Image (spheres, rainbow, N blue to C red):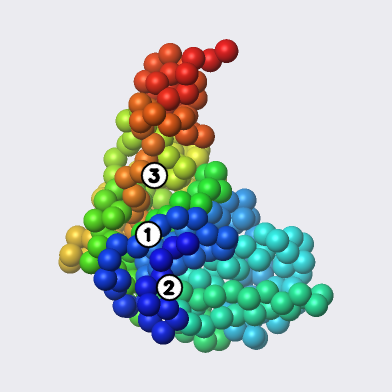
Amino acid sequence: MLWLGAGAGCGPTDAPTETPELGTTAQELLFLNGLAFNGLAFNGLAFNGLAFNGLAFNGLAFNGLSTQAFSDWFQVDPQRADMVMRYTVACAVPSGQVRTYTRNGTTYTWNGWFGLAPDWANGSPASTAEQQLISACLAAHGNKYGQRVLISVQGRSARGEPIPTPSWELDFFPEREACFFGNFFTGEGLFVGNDRGMLSERESTARACALSTSAEDARGACPPLVYVDSCQSRCRKDPTNTYYVSCTYNGITYRPLTTRLRSEDIYRCGDGTCQFTESCGTNRQYDNCGLDCGRCG
């Protein structure tokens, strides 16, 4: 289980007194402050825009979830829709709040956490800033393989409030990964920039949407996410130099989110483990890694 501090009485700003023990969980999604297991496959983002346009205007409350457009979208693929809504509510709604939806006698319950879009969560139409942040949050929680990887998410809510970060978090997640931004509500797209530099030929990761051995590989990694090269070339950082507060692309300025990884989630040919991203061979490249995966054949 992911260690959750002192229990339900603690708010998201309570920093733990020790580094948490990290592991697996039976939950689809589990958060601790800015930490989140991600595993939203990018085909999960291919939802009908009509439903989310309705939510944008009606708010992420009963009046939004009760529309016919939302019901029509949900019933096409309830399992995928449930997964998308888990991430959407976790991104938008503050910790301690839930959203429920009942269909054909089944009640779905989705927990809030980041609170990036508090006005939208309370039933108001989503502002442009809220649309951008929810888009960035969903993009950040997808990955090429749909694998569950623990990430650190940095940024600010639509009201300018920083995502709480305990003192140990940046040390525990030393690898800069990416900046995510865009607006799928308006059809402007979803974008990702590299915040670390390219991987070496020995490295690979399940988080392959931004981190790759070449810009060419990254550009085709995670459609509909568009790779836009380095974050530094597109974005402006906060005064602490920790995360990005704005990114500009195609003449539009967006509210982004920034992500960080643990060192062990960047795999290296020669570390003694044949990862699912590595292949057998005779060399030391991740896709020709005889050191970890042995010879082929």
The answer to whether the residues at label 2 and label 1 have Cβ atoms under 8 Å apart is no
The residue under label 1 is 21
Question: How far apart are the alpha carbons under marks 2 and 1?
Answer: 21 Å
Sequence-first tag of 3 and 2: 2
Whether residue 259 can be seen here: yes
- In which quarter of the view is residue 27 placed? bottom right
The quadrant the C terminus occupies is top right
Is the residue marked by circle 3 packed among few (<14), some (14-19), or many (20+) residues within 10 Å? Answer: some
Q: Residue furthest right?
A: 104
* Residue at the image point whose x is 32% and y is 45% from the top: 263
The residue shown at (44%, 45%) is 207
Q: Identify the amino acid type marked 2.
A: Phe
Q: Secondary structure beneath disc 2?
A: loop
> Label 3 vs label 1: CA separation?
16 Å
Q: Amino acid type of disc 3?
A: Asp
Question: Of 32 and 85, which appears nearest the observer?
Answer: 32
Q: Which residue is mark 2?
A: 114
Which label's residue is closer to the chain start, 3 or 1? 1
- Residue 19 placed where, x, y %? 30, 62
Identify residue type, mark 1.
Glu
Numbered marks: total: 3
Task: Give the residue pinned by disc 3.
Answer: 265
Residue 251 shows in this picture: no
User: Above or below — where is 142 with respect to 51?
Assistant: above
Position above or below: 61 against 281: below
